[in-house]
Image: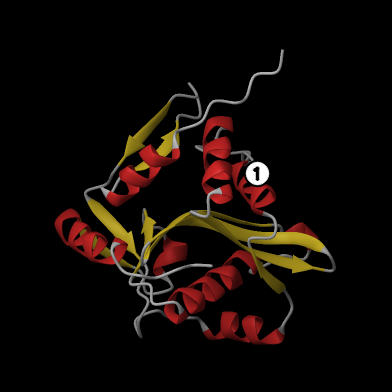
C-alpha cells in the first residue's frame, strides 16, 4: 500500500516563518525541527545590494535563461544533493513540505537554464513583502558557473519590482556577504519581519 511521504502542515510552516523560525532536518537522524538565530543575515533590497563587476557582466551576457517557478521540484532536489564533505538539511520531509508550499503558491524557485539544461537555481518562501531564501545550487560541470549568483540578482530585481521589503538569508557566509548582506540582531530582524509580512506584495 502506498504511503504519502510525511510533511509539515502548510499553516505550521507559515506561522513559523512569520515568527522568525525555519525548519531544518538533522542530516544524521533525519529529525526535523524549527530553528532561529540570534543574529540574522538579511540581503538589502535597496542601494546597499552590491553586484560585483564580473557578475554584472555575466548577468548582461545572457549566458543563462532565467525562469521562475517552472521546475520547483527539480530545484529543491538539486539543493538537497549531499556534498562529499557535508550532509544536507533538506530531507524527504522538507522536500515534500515545500513542494506542497509551492503548490499552494507560497514557495518559489528561480532557475538558470543553459542549452535546455537546468544548471542552477534557488528557492524560498514568500509571505507578504518578505522572502525567505532557503537554498541555492549550481552545476559548473554543465556550464553553470555563477548560475546561482545570477539567479540571486534576478530574485532581488523581482522583489524590488513587486514591493518586497525583506530578503532573509538566515545565516551569513562569505558568498552572501559579498552582495552587501547585513547581520542584524534578533530584535531588529523581528521588527523588519513584522512590517514586511503585512505588506500587500505578491511574488507571482
Q: Determine the residue located farthest toward the right in the rendered image.
A: 115
Can the viewer see residue 6 in this picture?
A: yes
* Residue 161: percent from left, percent from top: 46, 81
* Residue 58: percent from left, percent from top: 65, 81
Look at the image and tell me in which quarter the N terminus lies: top right
Q: Secondary structure at mark 1?
A: helix
Name the quadrant containing residue 198: bottom left
Category of crowding for the residue at label 1, using alpha-carbon neighbours closer than 10 angstroms: few (below 14), some (14–19), many (at least 20): some
Number of on-image labels? 1
Look at the image and tell me in which quarter the C terminus lies: bottom right
Residue in view at x 65 percent, y 19 percent: 3
Residue in view at x 58 percent, y 48 percent: 103
Residue in view at x 59 percent, y 31 percent: 92
Q: Determine the residue located farthest toward the top in the rendered image.
A: 1
Name the quadrant containing residue 87: top right
Q: Determine the residue located farthest toward the left in the rendered image.
A: 187
- Looking at this view, is 182 or 13 the one in front? 13
- Looking at this view, is 99 or 89 the one in front? 99
Establish if 67 lies above or below 141.
Answer: below
Name the quadrant containing residue 69: bottom right
Establish if 169 lies above or below 21.
Answer: below
Establish if 145 lies above or below 125.
Answer: below
Q: Is residue 78 left or right of residue 98?
A: right
Q: How is the image coloured?
A: secondary structure
Q: Is residue 41 left or right of residue 67?
A: left
Label 1 sits on residue: 77
Q: Is residue 151 left or right of residue 191?
A: right
* Residue 67: percent from left, percent from top: 67, 69
Can the viewer see residue 88 in this picture?
A: no
* Residue 117: percent from left, percent from top: 81, 61
Amino acid at each position: 500500500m502506498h504511503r504519502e511521504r510525511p510533511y509539515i502542515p502548510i499553516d505550521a510552516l507559515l506561522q513559523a516563518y512569520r515568527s522568525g523560525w525555519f525548519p531544518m532536518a538533522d542530516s544524521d537522524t533525519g529529525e526535523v525541527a524549527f530553528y532561529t538565530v540570534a543574529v540574522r543575515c538579511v540581503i538589502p533590497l535597496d542601494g546597499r545590494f552590491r553586484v560585483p563587476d564580473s557578475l554584472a557582466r555575466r548577468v548582461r551576457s545572457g549566458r543563462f535563461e532565467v525562469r521562475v517557478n517552472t521546475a520547483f521540484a527539480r530545484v529543491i532536489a538539486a539543493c538537497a544533493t549531499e556534498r562529499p564533505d557535508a550532509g544536507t538539511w533538506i530531507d524527504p520531509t522538507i522536500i515534500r513540505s515545500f513542494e506542497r508550499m509551492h503548490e499552494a503558491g507560497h514557495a518559489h524557485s528561480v532557475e538558470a537554464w543553459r542549452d535546455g539544461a537546468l544548471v542552477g537555481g534557488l528557492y524560498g518562501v514568500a509571505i507578504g513583502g518578505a522572502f525567505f531564501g532557503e537554498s541555492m545550487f549550481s552545476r559548473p560541470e554543465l556550464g553553470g558557473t555563477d548560475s546561482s549568483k545570477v539567479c540571486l540578482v534576478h530574485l532581488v530585481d523581482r522583489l524590488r519590482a513587486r514591493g518586497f521589503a525583506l530578503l532573509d538569508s538566515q545565516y551569513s557566509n562569505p558568498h552572501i556577504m559579498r552582495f552587501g548582506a547585513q547581520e542584524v540582531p534578533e530584535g531588529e530582524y523581528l521588527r523588519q519581519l513584522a512590517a514586511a509580512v503585512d505588506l500587500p506584495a505578491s511574488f507571482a
